[in-house]
């Protein structure tokens, strides 16, 4: 798959995940937030919970999409989350790191608290 096709597929997955979250009462604070060279796909808030969401969209997968959220990727998302929190008021909020697995047909397997900042 070409890079532009992969990006379009990823964008569709992020939009689907954003809609999924909004329908469940979340407010999307940021999309594709970058801090230096680190990125997090979605930042969402519901009540006093802020979720940093990594979206993995696949047409076919030999392994579960969340398995591609490697230790290095988790570290990058955590670093971006720390950068975001330095410039935004997150006092009193609980932070969690979620993974959204999106299939090309639109199915979503949403994994709350998929990992922690200590991982």
Image (spheres, helix red, strand yellow):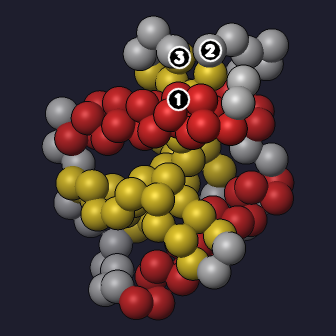
Mark 2–mark 1 Cα distance, whole angstroms, equals 9 Å
* SS type, badge 2: loop
Marks 2/3: CA distance? Answer: 6 Å
Residue 107 makes an appearance in the image = yes
Callout 1 crowding tier (Cα within 10 Å): few <14, some 14–19, many ≥20: some
Tell us which disc is closer to us: 1 or 3: 1
- Mark 1 or mark 3: name the one nearer the start of the chain: 1
Residue at 26%, 35% (x, y): give it: 19
Q: Is residue 82 above or below residue 6?
A: below
Residue lying at 47% horizontally and 67% vertically, measured from the top left: 33
Relative vertical location of residue 92 with respect to residue 33 in this rendering, above or below: below
Answer with left or right where residue 48 lies relative to residue 32: left
Where residue 50 sits: x, y (%)? 37, 62
Q: CA distance from mark 1 to mark 3?
A: 10 Å
Marks 2 and 1, the one that precedes in the sequence: 1
Tell me which numbered mark, 2 or 3, is placed earlier along the sequence: 2
> What residue is at 40 percent from the left and 90 percent from the top?
87
Label drawn at residue 9:
1
Q: Secondary structure at mark 3?
A: strand
Looking at the image, residue 100 sits to the left or right of residue 91; the answer is: right
Q: Residues within 10 Å of mark 2 (few under 14, many from 20)?
A: few
Indicate the quadrant where residue 95 lies.
Answer: bottom left
Whether the residues at callouts 2 and 1 have beta carbons within 8 Å, the answer is yes
Horizontal placement of 65 versus 91: left or right? right
In the rendered image, which residue does mark 2 sit on?
59
Above or below, comparing residue 67 to residue 30 in the picture:
above
Q: Which residue is mark 3?
A: 103
* Residues at discs 2 and 3 in contact (Cβ within 8 Å): yes
């Amino acid at each position: 798959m070409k890079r532009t096709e992969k990006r379009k597929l990823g964008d569709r997955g992020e939009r689907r995940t954003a809609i999924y979250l909004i329908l469940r009462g979340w407010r999307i604070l940021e999309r594709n937030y970058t801090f230096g060279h680190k990125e997090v796909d979605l930042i969402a808030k519901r009540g006093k919970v802020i979720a940093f969401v990594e979206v993995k969209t696949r047409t076919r997968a030999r392994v579960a999409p969340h398995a591609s959220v490697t230790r290095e990727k988790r570290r990058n998302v955590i670093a971006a989350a720390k950068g975001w929190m330095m410039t935004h008021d997150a006092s009193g909020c609980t932070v969690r790191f979620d993974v959204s697995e999106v299939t090309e047909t639109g199915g979503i397997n949403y994994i709350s608290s998929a990992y922690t900042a200590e991982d």
